[in-house]
């Protein structure tokens, strides 16, 4: 079969337009999806379709079209402020994001959001249909674009089409709260392949299909499920996303980074460094982590002055009130802990509220003795993998939430915790603090092997060859 252009579609492009003093300028986008996909598409020919950020329409289109981020051509989907309110802030981030992370009480099921979601998915379909042909491979990413398959098929696009969900898929008793549950499930079955981060998400999705689409026939075989619905065959499987291991590993060994690692360790001399790196998001479990940290100094008094947490918090979705409240709560807890336990020679928490440059991030990962990665729910969590890839001297301990997707792969080397159990997180910190160097090395070696093998390039190849294969199989079945 002839393989045509790869067309990647995601809510955001890898570069975002921002207004500078002399007009719009392009900046790299942040967040897990773009970080993961950027290296894969740097070298690949094809198109990347997405929203480029806010700015004056024509200028933005010209700027994006002329940018040379990669071999891949960037195609902007222009959205109005109204689209962004209803589709992005509203449906995507006030309904799907909290619901799919099991936080139904945070949802705002405003019916106008659904209209905006439908209309923006149509806009994405219109732009995609302009470049897709029979031989294209269309790969749609994430929860913002769950209706795209249906609209593209409606426009007569018959090419291979896959969908990958970067966030968790919730259990049936949570998913059923979604007023548009049937429409969304139905639309997903217009893709040839639906991919999830973990087997847990795949299982949850299949339970929802059984409950709400009884006409879809499901056949399980060897980790994958073949779904037949109205003559179309869709294959469903988990594809845990990875990182570019070599990039972190190689950078971490460069002399400038090694020097920066030594400098950080010298600044924090006499104490173990605990690192936390998160977008400011309630799913990342920041208040819970801080409460566990507070608990640590009351139950393990000998650890006072012996450890410091360096917590990077990257600003995110600041126009949503719940995110602004979270920032206040986080900063209040940090100042409480520093006020309660700190003294002139020791600060329990070093708080960095901005995005740091990649080399500094790698140096911080490399300098840390312990990484504290405790989301209350996470599709995968790339930070847990980046920490391992940057630990070239293999002495760091990874404390990881059981509810991060990465726990399915990293359970043999990490210390797993329930992030809601403050006592257990404090115990894990004490265990990591006291762990001897042999055990640290043994655990970190296992982790690094796993992260190196299941890297992002393999993930991409796996998904794409599976999609190719699935298409062949469904074409034969049709
Ligand atoms: C979604 C899913 C899934 C963070 N701070 C800085 C910085 N980062 C980078 C990290 C990492 C990325 O941001 C965050 O990725 P995560 O996976 O932790 O989280 P989400 O943004 O929520 O991503 C998630 C992911 O998609 C991929 O499928 O794993 O579950 O929610 O790469 O390094 N980068 C720099 N400076 C910072 O200060 N340069």
Image (cartoon, rainbow, N blue to C red):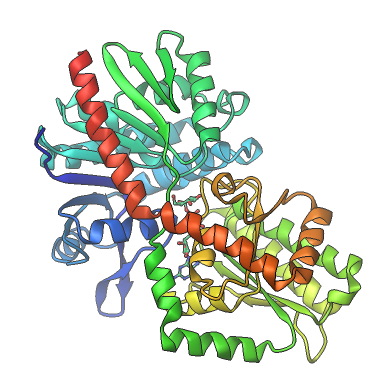
Left or right: where 296 falls relative to 383: right
Q: How many marks?
A: 0
Q: Quadrant of residue 422?
A: bottom right
- Residue 265 vs 301, above or below: the answer is below
Q: Is residue 279 visible?
A: no
In front: 152, or 381? 381
Left or right: where 391 falls relative to 3: right
In front: 86, or 401? 401
Image quarter of the N terminus: top left
Q: Position of residue 303 (x, y in %)?
A: 84, 75
Image quarter of the C terminus: top left
Left or right: where 441 falls relative to 220: right
Q: Residue at x 62, y 24 (%)?
A: 173
- Residue 296 vs 87, above or below: the answer is below
Q: Quadrant of residue 121?
A: top left
Q: Position of residue 270 (x, y in %)?
A: 74, 87
Left or right: where 242 falls relative to 350: left
Q: Residue at x 45, y 28 (%)?
A: 223
Q: Is residue 298 visible?
A: yes
Q: Quadrant of residue 162?
A: top left
Q: Position of residue 36 (x, y in %)?
A: 38, 56
Q: Residue at x 57, y 36 (%)?
A: 99
In front: 296, or 94? 296
Q: Residue at x 76, y 70 (%)?
A: 433
């Amino acid at each position: 079969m002839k393989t045509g252009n790869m067309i990647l579609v995601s809510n955001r492009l890898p570069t975002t337009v921002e207004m500078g003093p002399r007009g719009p300028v392009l900046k790299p986008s942040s967040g897990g999806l773009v970080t993961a996909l950027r290296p894969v598409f740097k070298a690949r020919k094809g198109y990347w379709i997405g929203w480029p950020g806010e700015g004056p329409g024509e200028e933005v289109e010209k700027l994006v079209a002329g940018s040379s981020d990669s071999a891949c051509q960037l195609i902007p989907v222009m959205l109005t402020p109204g689209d962004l309110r209803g589709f992005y802030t509203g449906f995507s981030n006030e309904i799907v994001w909290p619901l799919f992370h099991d936080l139904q009480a945070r949802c705002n099921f405003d019916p106008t959001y659904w209209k905006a979601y439908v209309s923006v998915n149509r806009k994405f379909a219109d732009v995609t249909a302009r470049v897709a042909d029979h031989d294209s491979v269309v790969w749609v990413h994430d929860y913002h674009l769950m209706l795209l398959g249906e609209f593209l098929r409606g426009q007569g696009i018959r090419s291979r089409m896959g969908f990958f969900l970067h966030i968790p898929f919730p259990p049936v008793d949570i998913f059923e709260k979604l007023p548009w549950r049937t429409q969304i499930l139905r639309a997903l079955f217009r893709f040839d392949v639906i991919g999830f981060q973990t087997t847990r998400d795949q299982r949850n999705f299949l339970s929802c299909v059984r409950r709400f689409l009884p006409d879809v026939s499901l056949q399980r075989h060897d980790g994958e499920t073949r779904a037949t619905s109205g003559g179309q065959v869709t294959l469903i499987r988990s594809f845990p996303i990875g990182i570019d291991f070599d990039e972190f590993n190689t950078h971490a060994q460069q002399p400038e980074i090694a020097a920066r690692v030594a400098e950080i360790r010298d600044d924090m001399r006499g104490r173990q460094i605990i690192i936390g790196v998160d977008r400011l998001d309630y799913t990342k479990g920041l208040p819970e982590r801080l409460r566990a940290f507070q608990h640590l100094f009351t139950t393990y008094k000998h650890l006072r002055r012996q450890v410091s947490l360096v917590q990077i918090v990257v600003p995110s979705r600041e126009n949503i009130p719940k995110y602004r409240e979270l920032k206040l709560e986080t900063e209040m807890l940090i100042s409480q802990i520093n006020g309660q336990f700190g003294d002139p020679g020791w600060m329990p928490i070093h708080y960095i509220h901005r995005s740091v440059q990649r080399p500094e991030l790698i140096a911080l990962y490399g300098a840390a003795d312990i990484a504290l990665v405790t989301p209350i729910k996470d599709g995968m969590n790339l930070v847990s993998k980046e920490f391992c890839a940057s630990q070239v001297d293999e002495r760091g301990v990874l404390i990881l939430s059981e509810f991060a997707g990465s726990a399915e792969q990293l359970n043999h080397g990490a210390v797993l915790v329930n992030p809601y159990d403050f006592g257990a997180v404090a115990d894990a910190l004490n265990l990591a603090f006291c762990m001897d160097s042999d055990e640290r090395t043994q655990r970190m070696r296992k982790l690094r092997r796993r992260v190196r093998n299941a890297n992002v390039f393999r993930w991409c190849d796996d998904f794409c060859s599976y999609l190719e294969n699935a298409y062949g199989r469904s074409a034969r079945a049709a």
